Image: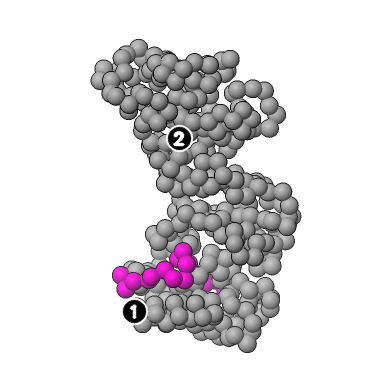
Amino acid sequence: MEYNRRVELHKYKRRDDDFKLEDIDHYEVFHAYTGVIPNVNKAIKTPFKSERTPSFRFYISREGVLKFKCYATGHGGNCFDFVAKLYNIEYKEAIVKIINEVYGDRKISGSKAQGSDVYVKPIHGVFTPKTEAKIEVILRDWVIYDIDFWKQYGLTIDDLERYNVYPCKQVWVYEDKMYYNYSSPKDLCYRYLINGKYKIYRPMIEKKGKWLSNMTRKEVQGLAQLPEEGELLVITKSLKDVMVLRKHSDIDSIAFGSESMTITKEIADYLYTRFKKIILFYDNDEAGLISMERISKETNIPYVSIDKELKVKDPSDLYKEYGKFAFQDAITKLIEI
């Protein structure tokens, strides 16, 4: 069965004579034989059979290679596997077919045309393999349950989208392991996008499974939304706190990946080139207080925390439990704005 492709194959033919198997770009091949631009965040209808609900997905393997998975048929693999299944031919025949139709009629050089483990070069410019190889997300529209949840913190859809927070329909880990599938308002899930990396938040889960992330120590939550310069910068422990402080107290703030993140003197010196005053504001539990004390000793950045008598740990819970005006009053006194 030949899939109805909208892309002219000759568009991809190359003129260079020194062509090797390693020169094959799997992105081009998938594009040529499906007629769509591969998008790891969007399922499409499978080319192998008729269906109403899209079940064909692209993903990036751990090696940084674009691959496919068809959940309707069970087929999966790289671009060579795809063409072999699409035309019901052998793997090596698929390689020759791709060479002839996409790259022109020329012999294959190199010694890697052995099987499904053939190397194909990573995509350039469109995807970030190290990120997408681990977490893939399908977003959904906002619903009333999302609005109600974030309303507890006084945050609107506009506030959330400003910080690249969106609701998830599905979340996949590695190639084909489903981490989350939206089915009930009792289990909402949100995607934070920070400098190309994902942090997945399931607020209804108590402990295990509440968070999933492929962020590294280089990603800083809220950094992209900061002004070039300012009077005050608060370093807190979560993006939710960053959004709440910005929305209700007009305070610029950022959050590193975790409270255990080491804020070096070099990082502090850089932040002081942009802001006149910096304050640490982590949770008031033992872990948060220990981290702030350690960082303060190393960087001379002062720290504050919420009075434990209020029985809340962080700015978000302070707003949730006491409301906007009590929150603003407490934050103003605490930080001495």
Res. 98 visible in picture: no
- Sequence-wise, which precedes: disc 2 or disc 1? 2
Q: Does 56 appear above or below 178? A: above
Res. 326 visible in picture: yes
* Quarter assignment of residue 124: top left
Crowding at mark 2 (Cα within 10 Å: few <14, some 14-19, many 20+):
many
Mark 2–mark 1 Cα distance, whole angstroms, equals 44 Å
The answer to whether 78 appears left or right of 2 in the picture is left
**SS state under label 2:** strand
Q: Position of residue 218 (x, y in %)?
A: 39, 59
- Amino acid type shown at disc 2: Leu
Depth-wise, is mark 2 or mark 1 nearer the camera?
Answer: 2
Q: Which residues are magenta?
A: 249-266
Q: Nearer the viewer, residue 147 or 119?
A: 119
Tell me which residue sits at (67%, 23%) in the image. 50
The answer to whether 286 appears left or right of 320 in the picture is left
Crowding at mark 1 (Cα within 10 Å: few <14, some 14-19, many 20+):
some
Tell me which residue sits at (32%, 73%) in the image. 265
In the picture of the structure, the residue carrying the numbered disc 2 is: 66
* Quarter assignment of residue 291: bottom left
Q: Nearer the viewer, residue 165 or 273?
A: 165
